[in-house]
Amino acid sequence: MPRLRASVLVSAIVVATALWASASRFAGAETTSTAQGLAAWDQVYSVLTSPRCINCHTATNYPQQGDDRHRHVANVVRGPEGKGVPGLNCAGCHQETNADSTGVPGGHNWHLAPLEMRWQDINDRALSSAAVCRQLTDRTRNHKLDGPGLLKHHEEEPLVKWAWNPGRRPDGTARTLPPLTHEQFIAATRRWVEAGTPCPSGR
Amino acid sequence: MATFQITVNGERREVNVDPSTPLLWVLREDLKMTGTKFGCGISACGACTVHVGGVATRSCIVPISHIGDRPIITIEGVGNDAVGRAVQDAWVAQDVVQCGYCQSGQIMSAVALLKSTSRPTEQNIEESMGGNLCRCGTYPRIRAAIKTAAAQINKGGA
Amino acid sequence: MLRAAAQVELNRRGFMRVSFAAAGGLFVSLYLDPASLAQEVALPQQPAKVYPPDAFVNIRPDGKIVIQVNRLEFGQGVQTALPMVLADELDADWNNVIGELAPAADVYKDPLFGIQMVGGSGSIAHSYQQYRELGGKTRAMLVAAAADRWKTTPDKCRTEASVVHGPNGQSATYAELASDAARKPVPATVRLKNPSEFRLIGKQVKRLDSRPKCDGSLKFGLDLDLPGMKVAVVAHPPVFGARVKKVSDGEARRVEGVRDIFEIPLAKGTGVAVVADKYWPAKQARGLLNIEWDFSGVEKADSTELWTRYKQLSQTPGAVAASRGDQNALDKVAATNRIVAEYEFPFLAHSPMEPLNTTVRFDGDRAEVWAGSQFQTADQMAVAEVLGLKTEQVLFHTEMAGGGFGRRAVTDSHVQREAAAIAKRLKGTPVKLVWSREDDVRGGYYRPMHYHRVEIGVGPDGFPVAWRHVIVGQSLLAGTPFEAMLVKNGVDETATEGTADTPYNITNLHVSVHHPKVNVPVLWWRSVGHTHNAYVMETLIDELAARARMDPITYRHKLLKPDAKKLHSTLELLDKQTAAWRNRLPKGHALGVAAHECFGTGVACAVDVSIENKRPKIHRATLAVDCGVAVNPLTIESQFQAGVGFGLTQLMAKGAITLKDGIVEQRNFDGYVPPYIVDAPVAVDVHIVPSAEAPTGCGEPPVPVISPAVVNALARLTGKRYRSLPLVTI
């Protein structure tokens, strides 16, 4: 009966491998998959800290604007829910869609990311890759998003998608896009999630 | 050019304009309502502030095509309700204005604040009025007038 | 700059001229009822909007008294204050007084300067006596008419609230008496009220223009709408004085609503005008123009290069503005007792809230202009010149203006010239020229850049024994009609005021100035030379006081000349009014003091400052003011409370206009950021020194003191001295 034993062995090995692989998906064990996950994270990080995204992920009382990430005009402030304050609500000026004739970006429910999702320090400097990664994966701070939750956020949240359709500046020129396309960003997020959302070590 | 139906201070109006035209210029030049002012055109000064769907909005940067059927209130109509009236009366009582050019916007922002927060703190005032520029510098009297209006509103139960 | 107390005699011809004006009709200074007057003397009907060109008081049949204000209202409150002065002497019912801005006409010229203008904080100072007399004489004529009617004598009548009362219970309203009064001779002199008789002057009288400015009904120049009116914008050269070489306007012309595009001459160089039905298409079309500019022969000013040049110039003395005492005194002071300080002040834009605009209609043999102008005489002449008309053929209306701060008083009338050039081409059609905020921020006419180098020799008692001061900055007046009056021996006084004439008792003083020629148009910015001179003086005085370990108020008292009355009085009042708080500040707060006199008014200022979010937070400012008679204490309080908010423009992190290779680097309020509510003092209390002296101005005096007061406070908090503006880091 050697053939039967061989096929059972092969199946067993396949199953074991599958089990072991799925275990490592959530165990973050040192595998080539982790290295790929870290590389994927690098790509995700490059998008998160590009102006179109990081300008609303501030650590301060205010959003930023422009590729030079200067403080937003008119002293607009965060407000208790990140939606501005009465008289200066984000949605007062930022409509549902971009206003290209006046150069004001728009998207559904325009508001600041919560402070738990700040990717800068209070001096407006981007946090390190390790620090941002830790924040994103800290379930006590990231509004309970797990890997698939993060992926869905990147895929579907209107303000995230806005970054790839950011409209025109007041001078008529097109706003700079993030360094990856949205599809590439999703693919990188997926790889990172599949690798178990590994974070680089360090500060 | 396209035709738009908008509601301004409770009245239905129709305009025929380039859809990219900011609401500010539709108000000023098509509807001849010049109370809403042009100060900068980049939403930095607040002179153009109106209320759209109850939200304070800088009309210089919102194209008419983005308005839809949300009702618009301008300085010409804000006095039709008790909060607006209280703010205008307080502005006059406290002799706030100097050149007056920014004051339409200041009043619209103050009304938005007081409709949401009837007992604003100093910080509330500073934050909500923080984007309205006054080159004359009437800020201290604006603060005083907001407090006067708040007192009036809370007394009268507006 | 105070006028002598001598009365300004307004002769009969000047005050009441019965004349036939160009528009056709009889204008009488006191009473204008076109319809009934026409009936009476069989004259043609009056056109719809006419002015009595030589009248100040118009008593209407309905009882309203319309008073013509001989200068622009742009926030300072003159449209209330001058009518108030006249109404008091007239005994008019204040509830029925209307203040109107007079059009350009000879009779409305400033009595001291001889041109129709507002500036130099001179409205009350120059026209107080004038308006008192106008009111007094009008009253005298009404009383004379009543006395006639009742067959009694004027001394037996009295007046109150627009009514004349006779000795036997008779009464008649001013409206009823007006036409009879108009026929009375204008008295050569008149007895004016004793201050104890004032009903309005000296009282807190609220502004006349508040309500319409709060309900959107008041029209500014920019709000003007005329039948058939077009709107124009102008593409200005990116470098001052450049000229249009070539224009591709195909795309621009295709914007719906665009009517015409053509080149026009500017005050310097040329530009391209876009005329459209409305502002938005005009602006869109301008953005689509492709213009090639000719920069040949045009200097490209550059801020970096200018700083280097100015610093170099400051090392050597320039044209002498003040020199007294021993010029070698400084060399005799040991190096350890010397202070050397160098200061940098950038270009500043005025940026009044209402963008610049002018409307002109040219009809071939006449023209009509509407502008919120601080300089009507000059602007009217400039429009006439461009249109090839005589000045009398130009009817120039003064519109209410949204701020000015000096920006609407330009000797070359460049905005009006642009508008006239466009109107000329559109003959018959009124055109409103609008400058966008970008045009304004980038359009020049700035407060000039200045560099100061000061060397002080400090005596053993901590007071300066020697003071050598070199100022570098463009002359405002060179090339203007004012040059002859105010530029002497190479010194433009508007650059040295506040330093050369310092009231501090410095025995050995030398102040000199260099006026480099730079291709950037410059202009007086509210308080002019005091903007930088007061900053230098008051920060250095403060430094000296700190070195001497003396209270800043005490130090100033000791160093000021005894005859610097208005500074002594205000410092005294400041001392009293700040006694409760200035030495009891919480941790992290510091006191800053500054005192300065300009345009005849003394001001002392104390601020309570802390640092919040890396910026100065001004919790409180206390101001003591000596402006002679306080004509309207409410206006004065407002001017000072708000004026300090304007003055803080100098300290804003982005409060500078800079140029790179000839091009202005800022474009709007995102790059040039004035003070918002968070930047202004939270509370300002103003105290006026009681005085019976002739009134002096309050428009500019609030500005110079605030910036040095604030940085003097910062110096106590950080130990640093702030000599380079704007204040980018603290």
Image (cartoon, coloured by chain):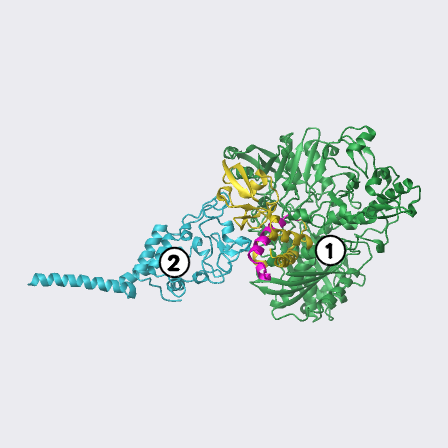
Residue lying farthest right? C152
What color does chain A have in the rendering? cyan
The percent position of residue C191, horizontal first and vertical second, equals 88, 49
Magenta span of residues: B100-124
Q: Is residue C198 left or right of residue C257?
A: right
Q: In this view, does C427 lie above or below C625?
A: above
Q: Which chain corresponds to the colour green?
A: C
| Residue under label 1 | C634
Q: Do marks 2 and 1 share a subunit? A: no
Judge whether residue B111 is colored magenta.
yes
Amino acid at the residue labelled 2:
Tyr
Whether pointer 2 and pointer 1 mark residues with C-beta atoms closer than 8 Å, the reply is no
State whether the magenta stretch is mostly helix, strand or loop.
helix
Q: In this view, does C247 lie to the left or right of C199?
A: left
Judge whether residue C577 is colored magenta.
no
What color does chain B have in the rendering? yellow
Q: To which quarter of the image does residue C629 belong?
A: bottom right
The percent position of residue C476, horizontal first and vertical second, equals 69, 47
Q: In this view, does B91 lie above or below C541?
A: above
Q: Is residue C19 above or below residue C76?
A: above
* Residue at figure coordinates x 8%, y 61% from the top left: A3
